[in-house]
């Protein structure tokens, strides 16, 4: 049901990657990875990516095609709660931002979400062996299985074991430039907002069924390095999200969530940047289980390739630093272009 769309995503990304030519252009902008916690019980909400601290210039567009592939395996039993999250998720996002004035930016994100048993279990097991990470019960579970379930006091409240693909929850975004010194190495701060609407199916975990409003500050500071060592950028974001009652574990859902990101990047040449970030959020549910009721902390690392002066490709890998609160391993690709 979902195989064709997912295959098309992979083909498009590989084709675009093969077209990369090193383009010596303007200084490559270092911005946060456009990704967030891809846990199947978290990505259904309106948790935003940190985004750039510089809004789009008036009359100009910024477009993004982003793909996130996450491998999940988490199992827990505690105080009458029992959960199993075993499977892979795929999220394709088409995002657009437009500069209205020199301070105001508006935009929208349209996501598609898919789930399957996947094919990455053996790769993840090897990754864990190489880096000495715990397998967390993976070796005792069937490989490439899709099974998401949660029960409380013997009553099943969540169950998904059939592969699917469909439209996710639409996001409407806005940004207001609070400060930008306009220098070659800019220091900037923006206030951003996101309204997530319940357009995706909650029964298939394409959406939450809730309407979510996020508000956050995002800032960055860039530094030119001596002796042609390129430039270094520090970036961060912090904010909060208010949620109406949704349709996924609604009796345990929290209506207020905090989130934040802190990261840095180094661009030694005008066609490449290496970057890493820590992203966190408070729990979306009330539960003694780590998979639901614990704050998440993820490390995302990778870099940006400058395809041209206006086109860039982000490649990132995400690892859960707080085990089971986010996927074991997730891959992110983001192709962006400024019009």
Image (cartoon, helix red, strand yellow):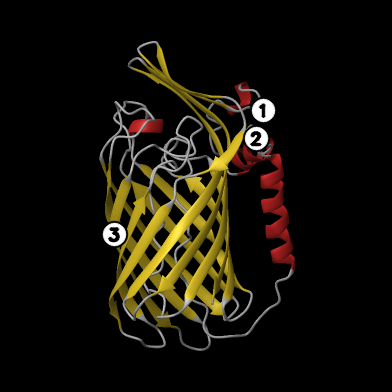
Image height check: is 231 above or below 273? Answer: below
- Separation of marks 3 and 1 at Cα, in angstroms: 39 Å
Q: State which quadrant residue 65 falls in.
A: bottom right
Image height check: is 275 above or below 91? Answer: below
Q: State which quadrant residue 311 falls in.
A: bottom right
Labels 3 & 2 near each other (Cβ < 8 A): no
Which residue appears at 44% of the width and 64% of the height?
A: 32
Which residue appears at 47% of the width and 80% of the height?
A: 231
- Separation of marks 2 and 1 at Cα, in angstroms: 6 Å
Circle on res. 216: 3
Q: Give the labeled residue for mark 1.
A: 143
Q: Give the labeled residue for mark 2.
A: 121
Image-based side of 303 in relation to 152, left or right:
right
How many other residues sit within 10 Å of disc 2, few (<14), some (14-19) or many (≥20)?
many
Which residue appears at 29% of the width and 35% of the height?
A: 245
Q: Helix, strand or loop at disc 2?
A: helix
- First along the sequence among labels 2 and 1: 2
Q: Helix, strand or loop at disc 1?
A: loop
């Amino acid at each position: 049901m979902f195989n064709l769309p997912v295959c098309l995503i992979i083909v498009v990304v590989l084709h675009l990657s093969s077209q990369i030519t090193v383009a010596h252009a303007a200084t490559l902008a270092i911005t946060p990875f456009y990704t967030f916690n891809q846990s199947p019980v978290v990505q259904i909400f309106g948790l935003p990516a940190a985004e750039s601290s510089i809004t789009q210039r008036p009359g100009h567009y910024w477009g993004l095609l982003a793909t996130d592939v996450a491998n999940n395996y988490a199992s827990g039993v505690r105080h009458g709660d029992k959960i199993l999250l075993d499977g892979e998720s795929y999220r394709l996002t088409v995002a657009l931002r437009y500069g209205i004035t020199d301070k105001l930016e508006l935009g929208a994100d349209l996501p598609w979400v898919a789930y399957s048993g996947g094919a990455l279990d053996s790769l993840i097991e090897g990754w864990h062996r190489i880096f000495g990470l715990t397998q967390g019960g993976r070796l005792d579970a069937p490989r490439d299985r899709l099974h998401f379930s949660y029960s409380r006091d013997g009553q099943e409240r969540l169950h998904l074991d059939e592969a699917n693909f469909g439209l996710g929850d639409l996001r409407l975004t806005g940004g207001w430039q609070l400060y930008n010194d306009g220098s070659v190495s800019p220091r900037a701060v923006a206030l951003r907002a996101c309204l997530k609407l319940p357009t995706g199916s909650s029964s298939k975990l394409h959406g939450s069924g809730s309407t979510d409003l996020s508000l956050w500050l995002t800032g960055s500071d860039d530094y030119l390095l001596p002796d042609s060592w390129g430039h270094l950028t520090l970036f961060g974001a912090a904010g909060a999200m208010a949620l109406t009652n949704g349709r996924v574990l609604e009796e345990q859902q929290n209506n207020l969530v905090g989130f934040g990101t802190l990261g840095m990047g180094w661009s030694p040449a005008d066609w490449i940047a290496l970057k890493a970030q820590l992203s966190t959020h408070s729990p979306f549910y009330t539960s003694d289980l780590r998979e639901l009721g614990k704050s998440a902390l993820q490390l995302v690392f990778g870099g940006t390739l400058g395809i041209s002066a206006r086109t860039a490709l982000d490649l990132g890998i995400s690892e859960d630093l707080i085990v089971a609160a986010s996927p074991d391993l997730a891959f992110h690709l983001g192709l962006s272009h400024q019009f």
